[in-house]
Image (cartoon, rainbow, N blue to C red):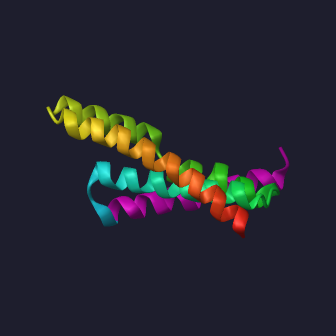
Amino acid sequence: MALLTALAVGAGGAAGAVARYAVGLSVGRRAVDTGLVNVFGSLLFGVAIGADFGGAPAVAVTVGFCGAFTTFSSFAVETVRLAEDGQRLAAAGNAVGTLAAALLAVFLGIALGAAL
């Protein structure tokens, strides 16, 4: 891996982690903020793929920023916690809704990116 690419991933990751933390603070509801970042991150990832700008900038956005911004593990834990708390319908809605919205966001992002 080239040094520039590694630095781009690190910079993107740092920005993504800070952005994720900021969303968590501003939204304040764990399952909601996680859903928002996962869907928006999927959209942004799709735009980067669709735009096909390649190189270090693409890796900084996709692997770095989106990798740090989105969080599958938090999504999984929050879904399980909802189920454990007896909110099985909310858990199922969170699981299906987040996955469907994230996939749709990627498709939309790819189309938007290709139009750039």
The correct choice, above or below, for 19 with respect to 68 in the image is below
Residue that appears at 29% across and 50% down = 30
Query: Between 35 and 116, which is closer to the camera in this rendering?
Result: 116
Q: Can residue 3 be seen in this view?
A: yes
- 84 relative to 72 in the view: left or right: left
Whether residue 81 is in magenta: the answer is: no
Residue that appears at 69% across and 53% down = 9
Quadrant occupied by the N terminus: top right
Residue that appears at 85% across and 49% down = 2
Spot occupied by residue 110 in the image (x, y as percentages of width and height) = 65, 56
Q: Quadrant of residue 45?
A: bottom right
Whether residue 12 is in magenta: the answer is: yes
Q: Is the magenta stretch mostly helix, strand or loop?
A: helix
Q: Is residue 13 visible?
A: no
Chain part drawn in magenta: 1-25
- 71 relative to 52 in the view: left or right: left
Spot occupied by residue 80 in the image (x, y as percentages of width and height) = 29, 31
- 7 relative to 11 in the view: left or right: right
